Amino acid sequence: AQTVTQSQPEMSVQEAETVTLSCTYDTSENNYYLFWYKQPPSRQMILVIRQEAYKQQNATENRFSVNFQKAAKSFSLKISDSQLGDTAMYFCAFVNTNAGKSTFGDGTTLTVKP
Amino acid sequence: KAGVTQTPRYLIKTRGQQVTLSCSPISGHRSVSWYQQTPGQGLQFLFEYFSETQRNKGNFPGRFSGRQFSNSRSEMNVSTLELGDSALYLCASSTGLAGHNEQFFGPGTRLTVL
């Protein structure tokens, strides 16, 4: 069974600064995807960034980037130039491409302060 | 394109009753996944339907069931409701199987069991 651990229940950052959210996972699978999802206070979950396990290059989407360390089973999210709209709960998710089951971490609540 | 819609948005039931939740995916999406979100257990995968067939199932009792129609709309049913079933139920749709594709989430149905 897969497990996903987000060790930081809450974090805060000043507007315009950089913050890193951590995520570790445990699996014996080789084929999988990793995702970061954002759930703002309005509750609609949206995808932030996706990483295929077979790709060594770290995924980047504008101000969001990941540090994917496959051997260490680590998948952290870096948010640069934090904005007030980044305030949300962030979930790290693992998807086994063979079984198709998604496993989510418990989430990190990020607050961006003005 | 319209996003994923879920009905109803809020629901109050009593123990022992049954409930049916509905999810309409984004047009063209063939996969619908269901998740239960609670403060204590986080986000847990219930099941995924693709082309009217259940493709994956999480670790939930048989009281939780679902189905998908030919137009990809999906329903989830919970029978003999328990207090612990109170949660936000999210559905997510994707073009193909969730294990390979980005999922788009609906706003959720907030179920309260009294």
Image (tube, coloured by chain):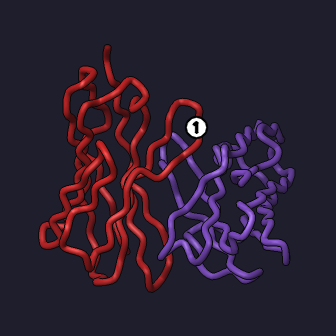
Chain colours: A red, B purple
The residue shown at (54%, 72%) is: B98
Task: Determine crowd level at label 1: few under 14, some 14-19, many 20+ residues with C-alpha closer than 10 A.
Answer: some
Q: Name above or below for residue B53 compared with residue B21.
A: below
Q: Name above or below for residue B103 compared with residue B90.
A: below
Residue B83 on image: x %, y %: 69, 43
Q: Amino acid at mark 1?
A: Arg
Q: Which residue is mark 1?
A: A43
Residue A42 on image: x %, y %: 59, 32
The residue shown at (53%, 30%) is: A41
In the displayed structure, does residue B30 sit left or right of residue A30? right
Quarter of the image where one finds residue B103? bottom right
Q: Quadrant of the C terminus of chain B?
A: top right
Residue A15 on image: x %, y %: 27, 21
Q: Name above or below for residue B99 compared with residue A82.
A: below
Q: Quadrant of the N terminus of chain B?
A: bottom right
The residue shown at (70%, 53%) is: B4
Quarter of the image where one finds residue B87? top right
Residue B110 on image: x %, y %: 70, 40
* Count of all numbered marks drawn on residues in the image: 1
